[in-house]
Image (cartoon, rainbow, N blue to C red):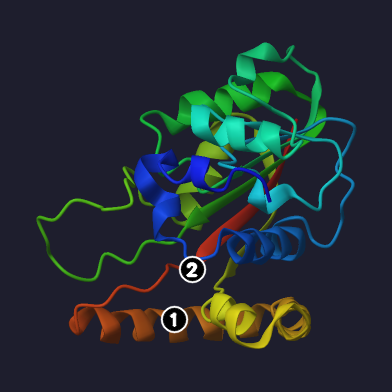
Amino acid sequence: MKNIKNIENSYNGHYKSISNIEIHIKKFQYLGYYFHFKQNPNWGKKVLDFGGRIGEKTRLINNVIVVEIDDQARKFMKKNKIKCTKRIDSFKDNSIDTIYASHVLEHVDNPAMYLAKFYKKLKKEGNLIIALPVEFPVFETKQIDTKGHIYSWNLRNINTLLDKLNFRVEENYIYSYLGMEFILKTFGEKIFLVCLKFFYFINRFKPIRFLLSISIFFCKLTLELLGLRVPNPEIVIYAKKK
């Protein structure tokens, strides 16, 4: 992996907190492949990973171009032969087969504006895949969000927004990946993949996803009482341009 040090200051130092960037990339390329792209590497001739940081979640997907505003992230990708560009406006309207936006809309000032832009760029019946954190506002607080989240999401409000923008929501899921990085670091890639495939399989069943979400909620509540933070579950939405 080339030029790892050059990426450290990207995203306000986000990558400085990652002890092993290669493990980080392996973890997210497999999570993206299974839980966001449903084990399917083929989503059309032109796939955009919008706000994709260093493209870690789309490494196993074909025909991807990462749209990333961060200069250091783009330099890192170019050194590693990952196609990328700075602006989505560089693409013609009605020209994109699939747009993927993972953990982006909670950070931007105007999510509806970006979704409307996605609609313009997608072909008719083009795919939109969105992943968003599920926020649990458990305690009253005056603290700001240290991850820079401006918006909180649930399935109803993102479904409503997509409907107003003339998207057709086809599927949505709630997932949690607690413990996956620990398994990868401790037991290696083979064991990690076995666990991930099993976890993906059981998550195909709605009652299990529901029970896992409830378990994560109470785990998060308990740990936050102790002053600790754990990752939020995420919602994944699949929609099409009408």
Crowd rating for badge 1 (residues with CA inside 10 Å; few <14, some 14–19, many 20+): many
Quadrant in the picture for residue 223: bottom left
- Residue 192: x and y in percent read 70, 81
Residue bearing mark 1: 216
Residue bearing mark 2: 233
- Callout 1: SS: helix
- Callout 2: SS: loop
Above or below, comparing residue 142 to residue 202 in the picture: above
Tell which of 5 and 123 is nearer to you.
5
Mark seen at residue 129: none
* Residue at image coords 75%, 65%: 34
Above or below, comparing residue 201 to residue 242 in the picture: below
Tell which of 8 and 63 is nearer to you.
8
Q: Do the residues labelled 1 and 2 touch (CB within 8 Å)?
A: yes
Crowd rating for badge 2 (residues with CA inside 10 Å; few <14, some 14–19, many 20+): some
Please indicate whether residue 226 sits to the left or right of residue 180 in the image.
left
Residue type pointed to by label 1:
Ile
Instruction: Choose the circle earlier in sequence order: 1 or 2.
Output: 1
- Residue 88: x and y in percent read 62, 21
Residue type pointed to by label 2:
Pro
Please indicate whether residue 134 sits to the left or right of residue 227 in the image.
right
Please indicate whether residue 102 sits to the left or right of residue 213 in the image.
right
Taking the view exactly as shown, the residue that stands out farthest to the left is: 142
Quadrant in the picture for residue 150: top left
Q: Quadrant of the C terminus?
A: top right
Q: Distance between the residues labelled 1 and 2?
A: 7 Å
